[in-house]
Amino acid sequence: EAGVAQSPRYKIIEKRQSVAFWCNPISGHATLYWYQQILGQGPKLLIQFQNNGVVDDSQLPKDRFSAERLKGVDSTLKIQPAKLEDSAVYLCASSLSLSGELFFGEGSRLTVL
Amino acid sequence: AQSVTQPDIHITVSEGASLELRCNYSYGATPYLFWYVQSPGQGLQLLLKYFSGDTLVQGIKGFEAEFKRSQSSFNLRKPSVHWSDAAEYFCAVGPPRDYKLSFGAGTTVTVRA
């Protein structure tokens, strides 16, 4: 069974530029999460989707971050404009349901210069 | 609010020796508790979880963890460490029936020959 796919794996941008990350969850998984993992810290939840609806985006910095899951499958996380402090690994995870075990992708590492 | 503290940032252990990683949590009731492992460049993999019942839980790769309500702890143990156990370990807590997890900052384990 294919796991959670994320791309790109690595991205380097200048501050104030924009960037987008893509996530393809495990087939059939209704719930999708985006986590931000800053170096030396544990992952922090940014947003949680159930199918194509947002369940929780209370920790998403909405002035610069946006995320969508239009057809309830793939998801895109966008940062515009990026700041230095956005340098992190962005992890996508999926689960069968809101109460199901999370399966994580390998992450997308962002460096903002 | 839920939170997790992992007091040890880095632990070095000899191959074949025992390992114990500490985790303390803050939560109003009995939470769901988890241990994840992250190898370099990889996503997080679930080692084990505690929901209820027997306070000693067994996981994959020979790991076990013990839930101690009186101490608000969920420490991870392995009797004999292998070189492949070198990785970063994260403790996480979530509300019952919800995988909206809060992670600790992680403990990096180095295994010396």
Image (cartoon, rainbow, N blue to C red):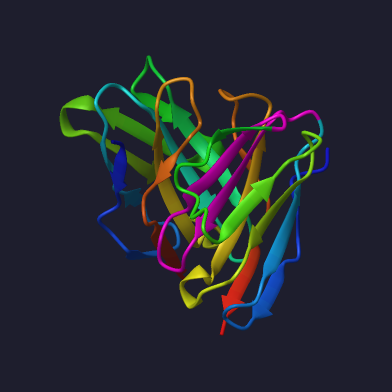
Residue at the image position 32 percent from the left and 63 percent from the top: B9
Q: Is residue A109 above or below residue B52?
A: below
Residue at the image position 51 percent from the left and 74 percent from the top: A83
- Given residues B108 and B44, the one toward you in this image is B44
For residue A46: magenta? yes
Q: Quadrant for residue A54, please give it.
A: top right
Residue at the image position 58 percent from the left and 25 percent from the top: A98
Q: Is residue A103 left or right of residue B93?
A: right
Q: Which residues are magenta?
A: A28-52
Residue at the image position 75 percent from the left and 41 percent from the top: A25
Q: Is residue B100 left or right of residue A51?
A: left
Residue B91's x, y, as percent? 40, 45
Residue A90's x, y, as percent? 60, 59
- Given residues B70 and B103, the one toward you in this image is B103
Q: Is residue A59 above or below residue A83?
A: above
- Given residues B54 and A82, the one toward you in this image is A82
Q: Is residue A38 above or below residue B101?
A: below
